[in-house]
Image (spheres, helix red, strand yellow):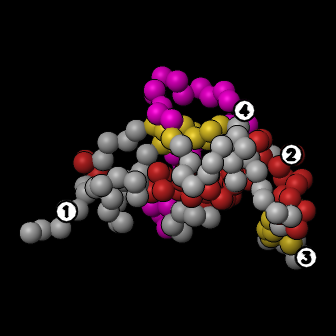
């Protein structure tokens, strides 16, 4: 018996919606990363981009557990001497909650050209409105969370 290897022509991309209101950031990010990489499909092949499109709603209402709002920091370097910058996640959630969700998902994707392509299929919205109704997205429930 031969092992099935997906080809780009075999991929059928669908659209999914994840409502992040009141859910932990990590649970939302792992669910979204699995859909973006295609790991939820039976035809998943690691070296082929099998993933789907994902819309994340209500990024303003995502929850960071414990003391992450004050203790966890996002650090980056500008490229200049002494250019190390940092901001705590409480400030990031107030100013740009979309970036918080994007950073969490991006960290769970492969660090390759395939991962960069998969990241382009992520659409994050601050509220419950999105402009992708024409694609008829299906709702996805985040696993391991009781509402």
Which sits in the foreground, 29 or 122? 29
Residue 90 x/y as whole percent? 88, 55
Q: Dot 3 surroundings within 10 Å: few (below 14), some, or many (20 or more)?
A: few
Residue 89 x/y as whole percent? 84, 58
Position of 40 with respect to 8 (left or right) is right
Residues marked 2 and 3 touching at CB (< 8 Å): no
From where the camera sits, is residue 109 visible? yes
Position of 133 with respect to 64 (left or right) is left
For residue 4, which numbered disc appears in the image? Answer: 1
In the image as oriented, which residue stretches furthest toward the front?
A: 146
Q: Residue at x 86, y 72 (%)?
A: 84
Question: Mark 2 — residue?
Answer: 95
For residue 127, which numbered disc appears in the image? Answer: 4
Q: Secondary structure at mark 2?
A: helix
Q: Residue at x 45, y 57 (%)?
A: 37
Question: Mark 3 — residue?
Answer: 82
**Of label 4 and label 1, which has the lower sequence position?**
1
Position of 74 with respect to 47 (left or right) is right
User: Which numbered disc, 2 or 3, marks the residue closer to the eye?
Assistant: 2
Number of marks: 4
Q: Residue at x 63, y 48 (%)?
A: 146
Quadrant in which the N terminus is drawn: bottom left
Quadrant of res 72: bottom right
Which sits in the foreground, 143 or 73? 143
Q: Secondary structure at mark 3?
A: loop
Cα distance in 3D space between marks 4 and 2: 14 Å
In the image as oriented, which residue stretches furthest toward the top?
A: 134
Cα distance in 3D space between marks 2 and 1: 46 Å
């Amino acid at each position: 018996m031969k092992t099935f290897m997906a080809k780009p022509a075999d991929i059928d991309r669908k659209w999914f919606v994840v409502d992040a209101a009141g859910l932990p950031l990590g649970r939302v990010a792992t669910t979204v990363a699995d859909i973006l990489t295609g790991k939820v499909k039976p035809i998943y092949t690691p070296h082929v981009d099998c993933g789907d499109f994902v819309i994340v709603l209500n990024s303003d209402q995502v929850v960071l557990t414990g003391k992450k709002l004050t203790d966890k920091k996002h650090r980056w370097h500008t490229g200049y001497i002494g250019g190390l910058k940092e901001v705590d996640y409480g400030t990031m959630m107030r100013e740009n909650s979309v970036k918080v969700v994007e950073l969490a998902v991006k960290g769970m994707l492969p660090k390759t050209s395939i991962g960069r392509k998969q990241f382009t299929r992520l659409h994050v919205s601050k509220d419950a409105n999105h402009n992708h109704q024409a694609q008829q997205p299906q709702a996805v429930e985040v696993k391991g969370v009781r509402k």
